[in-house]
Image (cartoon, rainbow, N blue to C red):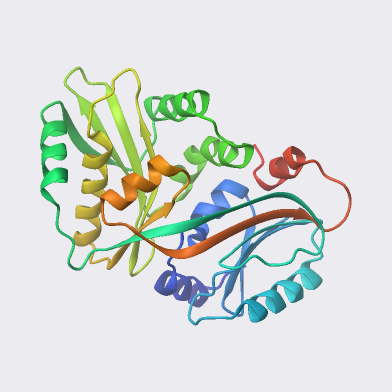
Amino acid sequence: MLSLDQKEYIKKHAYIPEHLTEYVVSISQSEPFLFDEYILYFKDSHLIFIGYPLGKTHSKEETEKILDITIEKFKPKSVALISPFSLISKGKILYKTSDFYYHLSLSHFMLNSYLKNTIKRALKEVITQKCNNITEQHIELIYEFIKTHQVDEYTKLIFKKIPDYINFSETTVLFNAIDKKGNLSGFSIADYGADKYAFYMFNFISRRDYVPGVSDLLLYEIIKEAKTRNKLYLNLGLGINKGIEFFKKKWSGEPFLNYEFCLYKVSKVFSLLDTLKKLFPF
C-alpha cells in the first residue's frame, strides 16, 4: 500500500510507463509497493518488479540484491521483471525479450519540414479532439489491431485491458482523429501523471478509415499538450519493431534506456499463458 508521500515521490521521479501505478494496477489488478527506490506490484503470489530506481542510479548488483530481498519477503510463485540489466533469474524462464525505451526532449523541440507537411496533409481529412472516456469505436480499433498484427500473448492481454486503464486513471488523455464522415480514423493515448515526463502509451489506426499521416498528427497533439503542461520529456515507449523504431526516430526520439523483460516461475509449474492470465486477470 502506498502512502500519500510515496505517491508524490513516485510522481516526482517517474520516467517510464511502469512507474505509473494507475496504469499497472488497472492492467494487473495488483497492489503497488515502494521498496527502497523501486516500485513493485504484487497479487496472488505473482510479483511484478520494476527494476528502474526512482530517485538515484543503482548498479546491476544493487538492483539484483533488492530483487532477491523482495522475493524473499513476498515469496512469489512467479516474477515479471523489467530492468535495464539482464538479471539472472532464480527460476525457470517462461518468456524473455529485450528492447529500448525512446524519449524526446521537449525544451527545444521543433517540427521539421517533412513532419509539417505530413501533419498539414492529414488535417485536410481529419479533425482532432481530446477526451477522457473510451468508447466502442476505440475498442473496435484495439481489437482490429490485435486481429491484423502479430501480437504476443503478453502484449495482447495488456491491449485488452486498456479500457480498464482509461476508466481507472485520472491522468490519461485520448487524442482522436475524426474524418469528414464522423469515423474514428485513429486515436492515441497519453498519460501526464508524472512531473517531468509525459508518456506516449498507445496508438491505434483504422485500416478501413485510414488517413495518411494521422499517427504523426496525433503525436503532435500529444506533444503540444505536454508542453502546455510544462513537461520536459516525452517517453515514446519501446522500439517494438523496425517500423515503430523508424517512426520514433523520425520524431527525433532517442533510445535512452535499455529494457530487459523476463517472466519466470520461482516454484510450481505454470504455463506461460496461465501465468499471464494470473498477472492480467479478466
Residue 133 image-quadrant placement: top left
Above or below for 203 versus 6:
above
* Residue 52 or residue 76, whichever sits in front: 52
* Residue 86 or residue 16, whichever sits in front: 86
Q: Position of residue 52 (x, y in %)?
A: 54, 70
Q: How many marks?
A: 0
- The residue at the point 47 percent across, 71 percent down is 10
* Residue 66 or residue 44, whichever sits in front: 66
Q: Position of residue 109 (x, y in %)?
A: 18, 61
Q: Position of residue 221 (x, y in %)?
A: 21, 47
* Residue 215 or residue 240, whichever sits in front: 240
Q: Quadrant of the N terminus?
A: bottom right
- The residue at the point 51 percent across, 63 percent down is 258
Residue 42 image-quadrant placement: bottom right
Give the left or right position of residue 162, taking residue 232 as reference. right
Instruction: Residue 202: tell me if it is visible.
Output: no
Instruction: Residue 69: tell me if it is visible.
Output: yes
Q: Position of residue 23 (x, y in %)?
A: 50, 53
- The residue at the point 31 percent across, 31 percent down is 186
- The residue at the point 27 percent across, 68 percent down is 232
Give the left or right position of residue 225, taking residue 244 as reference. left
Q: Quadrant of the C terminus?
A: top right
Give the left or right position of residue 3, taking residue 17 as reference. right
Residue 272 image-quadrant placement: top right
